[in-house]
Image: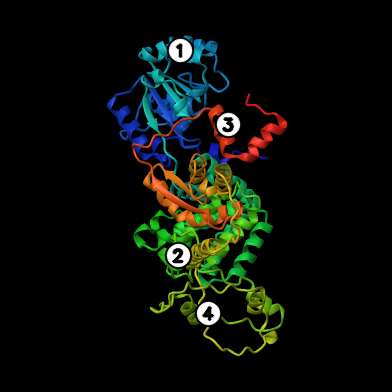
């Protein structure tokens, strides 16, 4: 049995012309070889599997070729090229820095640098994964890297450029390798399939190229895996089955359902996807990419930005004609919000289902919205499904009537009362979703009430609350207390503090201000004076006067309590009393306190 060699090794490029997806870098290296302008150190950076080590080996082979070609390639026939192809060349030394990252390994490398080449002009030292070298190894390598012998050339390769010391980078020519495009990978996979006698569909190769994420080595490994699974005939369905990739047909179907407002079909399709073992976030991420491709496909000039085969691009263009840019924009925002909130959600399936429900109702939303959700009230979801289960025809909704009902009606000029919003009851909701055969005839005696939008409902509700609050204040102020019980300044102050403490939390600032005020009882025994520190406080107290007077009348049991307000003047001086002075004043004003003092023989400590 012949020894099997994986495609990544078997079809490894041997010349610059066969390197895929790095045309600019290979041309630069070939021109440098032809002109003889070779640097003593190179740094090849880029993702995994894009050709860094391969280009380093081709470069080392070409500069030692005894009979180079006019196009800058190696001949492949001289002794140096044959030694390289057979793996017995002493002019090329490779060091894996991931497993040889100590100072001793670098010192052994430096000892080999001193020995000149036996065949060819240069000795090339390729250090792979150079970012894995230790700090001490980097320091030991600095001097040799800066001033090597004329016959020595260093090629450093790394996938993590940011971990390389600046002192190392400053001594090298830096070449940044890019990720390979989907088209480049597909073209190379087609050539490999032809050489191996394997038939492959373009859509299947496109899935492999996308799965490789810009790495040719990963693409060839996946190609070998799928080829073994498919038995030499690579099809799209077998490829997505082997790689566990969600079929893009699901996204096309879901988009059609959302455009047509078929919520039930959307839910059933999502259940089918989840039952196959796909994660909800994986699905919503794919849906976001699908919506983005639809937005791109609406302009023929940007269709090339879609990484897909020509057959799939055509399907995108056909479906893009059914979707408006407004719908796609809102749907993308909904999908993006779902993706951001997925990890924090406790019920992840419900989050995805709500997103699909909102998407399915975007096409019928004609009002202004922020793009996150429709402004209309959500319609019944499983109405048609219930009707089918009951054996009756689905209830047909009159879109003209619904649209007319959602439009605001002009207000009458003579109507000054606050409009009331009709709240839907449970019976109304049940009758709306019940089958047609159970519906009872209803005599219509009044026009159909206006269906409020979420925005109008909130505005009306706020107006109702404000009007209700004013009515309550007027009712509180209208309370009449028939008693005329006498009271002193101490009782007045205590009742004033109690009212301040009972204010709601939103009036906490006013509560603190009132707590620091001192109401002064006048000579008539029912009127008291409150001095405000500034006009703002005076204005607030004027608005609160009915509530304060009503509370104090009930608390002090005197219906003639009256409050007067005055703004503090500059000449007003507020004396600061000590505790003893306050105690003496309270004794003078309160007979009950004096009696309490005599009975219990109390003194101020």
Tag 3, which secondary structure? helix
Q: Residue at x 61, y 60 (%)?
A: 353
Name the image quarter holding the N terminus. Answer: top right
Q: Nearer the viewer, mark 4 or mark 3?
A: 3
Read off the residue under disc 4: 449
Q: Position of residue 154 (x, y in %)?
A: 42, 20
Q: Position of residue 266 (x, y in %)?
A: 60, 66
Label 3 crowd (10 A; few <14 / some 14-19 / many >=20): some
Name the image quarter holding the C terminus. Answer: top right
Read off the residue under disc 1: 139
Q: Residue at x 66, y 53 (%)?
A: 347
Q: Nearer the viewer, mark 3 or mark 2?
A: 3
Q: Position of residue 465 (x, y in %)?
A: 52, 63
Read off the residue under disc 2: 327
2 or 1: tag closer to the N-terminus:
1
Does the CB distance between marks 3 and 1 fall below 8 Å?
Answer: no
Read off the residue under disc 3: 583
4 or 2: tag closer to the N-terminus:
2
Tag 2, which secondary structure? helix
């Amino acid at each position: 049995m012949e020894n099997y060699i994986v495609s990544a090794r078997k079809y490894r490029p041997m010349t610059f012309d066969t390197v895929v997806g790095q045309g600019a870098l290979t041309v630069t290296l070939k021109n440098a070889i032809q002109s003889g302008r070779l640097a003593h150190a190179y740094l090849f950076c880029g993702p995994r599997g894009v050709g860094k080590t391969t280009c380093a080996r081709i470069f080392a082979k070409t500069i030692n070729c005894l009979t180079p070609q006019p196009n800058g390639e190696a001949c492949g026939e001289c002794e140096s090229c044959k030694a390289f192809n057979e793996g017995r060349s002493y002019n090329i030394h490779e060091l894996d820095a991931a497993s040889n990252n100590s100072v001793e390994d670098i010192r052994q490398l430096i000892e080999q640098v001193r020995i000149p080449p036996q065949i060819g002009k240069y000795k090339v030292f390729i250090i792979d994964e150079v970012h894995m070298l230790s700090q001490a190894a980097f320091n030991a390598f600095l001097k040799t890297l800066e001033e090597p012998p004329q016959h020595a050339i260093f090629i450093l390769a790394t996938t993590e450029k940011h971990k390389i010391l600046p002192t190392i980078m400053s001594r090298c020519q830096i070449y940044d390798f890019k990720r390979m495009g989907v088209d480049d990978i597909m073209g190379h996979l087609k050539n490999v399939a032809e050489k191996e006698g394997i038939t492959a569909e373009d859509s299947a190769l496109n899935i492999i190229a996308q799965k490789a994420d810009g790495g040719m080595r990963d693409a060839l490994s996946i190609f070998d895996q799928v080829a073994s699974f498919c038995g030499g005939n690579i099809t799209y369905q077998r490829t997505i089955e082997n790689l566990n990739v969600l079929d893009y047909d699901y996204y096309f179907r879901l988009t059609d359902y959302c455009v047509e407002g078929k919520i039930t079909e959307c839910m059933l399709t999502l259940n089918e996807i989840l039952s196959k073992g796909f994660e909800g976030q994986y699905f919503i991420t794919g849906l976001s990419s699908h919506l983005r491709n639809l937005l791109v496909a609406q302009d023929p000039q940007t269709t090339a930005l879609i990484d897909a085969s020509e057959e799939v691009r055509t399907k995108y263009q056909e479906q893009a004609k059914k979707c408006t840019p407004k719908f796609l924009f809102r749907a993308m925002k909904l999908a993006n919000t779902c993706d951001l909130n997925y990890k924090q959600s406790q019920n992840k399936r419900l989050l995805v289902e709500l997103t699909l429900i909102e998407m399915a109702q975007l096409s019928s939303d004609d009002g202004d919205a922020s793009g996150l959700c429709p402004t209309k009230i959500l319609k019944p979801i499983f109405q048609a499904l219930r009707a089918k289960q009951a054996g009756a025809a689905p209830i047909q909704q009159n879109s003209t009537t619904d649209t007319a009902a959602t439009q605001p009606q002009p207000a009458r000029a003579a109507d000054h009362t606050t409009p009331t919003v009709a709240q839907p009851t449970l019976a109304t909701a049940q009758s709306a979703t019940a089958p047609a055969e159970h519906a009872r005839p209803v005599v219509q005696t009044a026009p159909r009430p206006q269906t409020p939008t979420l925005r109008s409902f909130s505005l009306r509700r706020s107006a109702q609350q404000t009007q209700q609050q004013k009515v309550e204040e007027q009712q509180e102020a209208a309370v009449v207390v028939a008693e005329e019980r006498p009271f002193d300044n101490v009782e007045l102050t205590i009742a004033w503090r109690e009212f301040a403490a009972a204010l709601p939390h939103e009036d906490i600032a006013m509560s603190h201000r009132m707590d620091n005020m001192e109401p002064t009882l006048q000579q008539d025994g029912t009127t008291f004076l409150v001095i405000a520190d500034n006009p703002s406080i005076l204005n607030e107290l004027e608005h609160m006067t009915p509530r304060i007077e009503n509370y104090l009348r009930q608390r002090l049991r005197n219906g003639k309590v009256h409050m007067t307000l005055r703004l503090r003047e500059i000449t007003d001086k507020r004396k600061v009393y000590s505790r003893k002075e306050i105690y003496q004043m309270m004794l003078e004003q309160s007979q009950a306190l004096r009696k309490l003092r005599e009975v219990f023989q109390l003194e101020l400590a």
